[in-house]
Amino acid sequence: MTEHFDVVVVGAGISGVGAGYHLQANSPDRSYVILEGRERMGGTWDLFRYPGIRSDSDMYTLGFSFRPWTNAKSIADGPSILTYLEDTARDYGIDKHIRYRTRVKSAAWSTEDAAWSVVAERDGEEQHFTCNFLFMCTGYYNYARGYTPEWEGTGDFAGKIVHPQFWPQDLDYAGKRVVVIGSGATAVTLVPEMAKTAAHVTMLQRSPTYIVARPSEDSIANWLRRRLPSKTAYAITRWKNVLGQQYFFRLMRKHPDKAKENLISMVRDALPGHDVETHFTPTYKPWDQRLCLIPDEDLFASLREGSSSVVTGHIDRFVPEGIRLQNGETLPADIIVTATGLELQVMSGIPLTVDGKAVDIPKATTYKGMMLSDVPNLALSFGYTNASWTLKADLTCEYVCRLLNAMKKRGLRQVTPRLSGPVEEVPFLDFNSGYVQRAMANFPKQGTRKPWRLNQNYTRDLMALRFGGIDQEMEFSNPVPKAAKAA
């Protein structure tokens, strides 16, 4: 049996829950279903369960525009974020639209039918859906596999090797020597949390990362919430943080040397007597990679106390007692955590066809950072790299609803981004992080001009997606058949 919905949303993480709300609020006459491959909603915030898991964006911008974040902490832990998502889905009735353990395997567009045919699998059985619009809210990485480099001697190591994406809930690291390989957001979260009970935690990095400390609570937000209605206080705080993020991002991009000097100076102040030049001074410019946020200086505090340390060097091989570096030093370990990054993936690797022809994702060009050239009635939710994911996800949902409403008003069933002329192609993401560079060959490209350029700017996207026109290099076609109109 095939079920039909106006919209099929793939993924019940933060983007999918937001999509459900916006469809109900802005296109209430459309039926929708959310297909989720896992057993629970939450995406990232349910999958990752390693110690200390938390946001590295403030919750006043990572939270939804329509639902205030009311907890005292701005930098929130994973379980609190998951509860926020679950409460949102329940309170707005979005949870009733979610089909769990339903993993989408493929999607095929038919111009004749003006519909996508979606094949999914649930408990080993195929399920079939059709929809007029397909909204991919699948996140940006492979849920089934994290990135782990190949090292010699991993089989020789006498202890346990763990990847944060698949954290064993029964792992006991109390009193153990731990080496965390990596220096990104996951590593700087794990180290101070594990150091609370481990014998010692060593963060082993090939090269330093920019690390910025900020309070876990937003004192201005908490002050406003005590004096104003929650929605008003939330809106003011949200804009305060958005504009602040944009200001400092532009400032760092415009004056990278000065920005680097200030960032490193703050680390020196926090870590007197430490070798900041070796361990905390990156070779790249600020925002060539994402900055690492630590709340309340927790990493610096553990380094000052001596419960953790940082080693900068290259791995030679694993040995029974730990890790041997190329300089001959051996780091003893009972547990090694490979916080070496994600494996990025577009739309969960789901194969697409348009009228029987396979869509070659790397050859497609992104339209406004949310649709693909020559692929009808499909959008993907992809957040910002220099700000909170949800800021762009919310705007993408609004834009999808604008397209749905315009098609209905015009009596047309199909909307397709079309390149009107040549456009210079550049990588989808302008980041030199290893996990980004490894994946860009499999991502679509972006252009160097509107509407094919991917903005990393919320206010610019706000004007374009909420208030801008919808016809620029966008083809509306495929009229509703007369019989259907009469019915």
Image (cartoon, grey):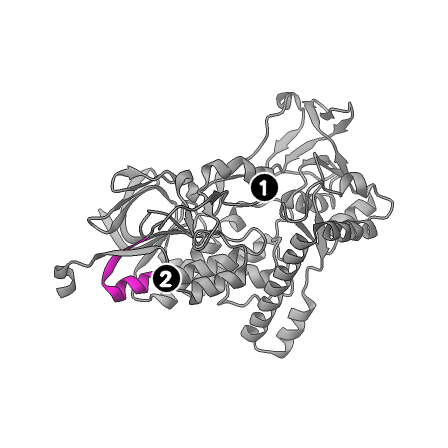
Q: Is residue 188 magenta?
A: no
The residue mark sitting in front, 1 or 2, is: 2
Question: Looking at the image, is 407 positioned above or below residue 151?
Answer: below
What residue is at 33 percent from the left and 67 percent from the top? 28
Q: Earlier in the sequence, mark 1 or mark 2?
A: 1
Specify the amino acid type for callout 2: Ile
Q: Is residue 405 magenta?
A: yes
Report, in whole angstroms, how far the alpha carbon at label 1 lies from the one at label 2. Answer: 48 Å
Magenta region, residue range: 401-416
- Could you classify mark 1 by the number of other residues whose Cα lies within 10 Å: few (under 14), some (14-19), or many (20 or more)? few
Question: Looking at the image, is 271 positioned above or below residue 359?
Answer: below
Query: Which percent across, then down, holds residue 17?
Result: 44, 57
Q: Secondary structure at mark 1?
A: loop
Query: Which percent across, then down, holds residue 192?
Result: 72, 46
The answer to which quarter of the image holds residue 481 is: bottom left
- Which quarter of the image is occupied by the C terminus? bottom left
Residue behind mark 2:
470
As drawn, the label of residue 110 is none
Left or right of residue 337, residue 398 in this image: left
Would residue 406 be visible to someone looking at this image? yes
The front one of 447 and 87 is 447
Residue behind mark 1:
169
Would residue 146 be visible to someone looking at this image? no
